[in-house]
Amino acid sequence: MSRIWKRILIILGAATIIVIIGLAYSYYVMNYYNPDLFEVAIDQQALTYYHDDYSESREAFISQSRELQGSYDSVIIFKTPVESSTDTGLYIDYCFFPGIDDPDRLLILSSGIHGIEGFAGSAVQIMFMEEFLDKGLLKNTAVLFIHGLNPYGFKHFRRFTENNVDLNRNWDTDKSLFATPNPGYFRFTNMINPSKKVNLDNAGNRFFFLKAIIKMITNNIEFARQSILQGQYEYQDGLYFGGMDFEPQVHTVRTILEDICEPYQVIFHIDLHTGYGQWGTLHFFPNPVKDPLAKQNLEKIFTEHEIDWGDEEKFYTITGGFPTFVGKLNQGKLFLPMTFEYGTMDSHTTFGSIKSLQIIINENQGHHHGYVRDRDSTIIIEQFINMYYPQSEAWQTRVIQTSREAFNTLLPRYYELSAKR
């Protein structure tokens, strides 16, 4: 055998070994991935703020609101129904504290826009009611709690509405939102919106990491992230579908916000989410803030915290976001939007983000097209719940702890801000 053929065989053998190692690594990563957990001392008191279904969470929020109403006559509790063709008893609940001595600033805490994320959001709201509302706060600031913006998703452990709409891509003051182009999305739709029953044993799932990495690299990772997550208004059964019209709650919530926000010149809006980022860690990010004064004041409030401003290559921006919508309703005021995001899957890493994507793809695929086996359904639903509402006492404890720490440092700075632009 000639030296040339020997070299060719050596190269082919080495390439084969590399491919086998790559496939084995891909298989292991996708089938045995777990986020990097760290030790947390369990706080039983913190766990009492959580409830494991929509009705219990809602009842706990209303009960805590009524306790406050017993202490402060000015507290207003009300609800608005959300229309459904398949369900009943779906409500957005509100608790409003006008404050004492006509304060000129308002704090908004909203939860559950992504349905299943409402379990942690509700717990944080209830904790805030119990631990942070006192006469000192109410003299300076009015507070509005909005609980369960997407009650259908909350009730059915989904991220989307009954119409498969990602509600955080569905808010605007103008219907031109639904003509917003996302030309990159179609490049990924075959990967992220499969149209067959979910089969966890097929090669596409077993080696999803390899498939996704190849797709991301060939299309540029930053471009892929932005195209997939931005929001799209064409594929009704697809991920991150923002709708073709406003969801029923948009008009109702708009009317309420316009009425309540009207007298206040400084508004701090905290929208509560789970899923993105390091397990057990509270991340802060708004959609890009275009008002220089608002950005300057947010930097003052969050002095010792890192903010992902959404305008860097490593991050992404969205269309139709709820805080941006609230800001549009309050133009000319000092509006300070911030998303509180409690990490679950280490999705700030490549492995975590791809595993998270696989889980949300499988859940959406299963919802629309079913599962090959009951076992597949059980596994995916369990993975999906743990991605947005981890059944971990350590994680649940950490959410309350980090929220408490954040509020203790952020709120005093907010109270001190000038209401003048």
Image: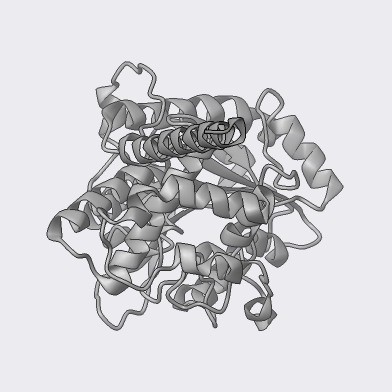
Residue 306 at least partly seen: yes
Marker count (numbered): 0
Q: Residue at x 66, y 60 (%)?
A: 324
Q: Is residue 174 above or below residue 256?
A: below
Q: Residue at x 51, y 38 (%)?
A: 12
Residue 277 at least partly seen: no
- Residue 109 is left or right of residue 120, and the answer is right
- Residue nearer the viewer, 235 or 28: 28
Q: Residue at x 85, y 46 (%)?
A: 292
Residue ranking furthest to the left = 374
- Residue 412 is left or right of residue 130, and the answer is right
What kind of colouring is applied to the model shown? one colour
Q: Residue 124: x, y in percent? A: 41, 39
- Residue 327 is left or right of residue 210, and the answer is right
Q: Residue at x 20, y 58 (%)?
A: 377
- Residue nearer the viewer, 209 or 171: 209
Q: Residue 148: x, y in percent? A: 39, 58
Q: Is residue 7 above or below residue 68?
A: above
Q: Is residue 263 above or below residue 139?
A: below
Q: Residue 254: x, y in percent? A: 57, 71
- Residue 121 is left or right of residue 421, and the answer is left
- Residue nearer the viewer, 261 or 84: 84
Q: Residue 185: x, y in percent? A: 60, 67
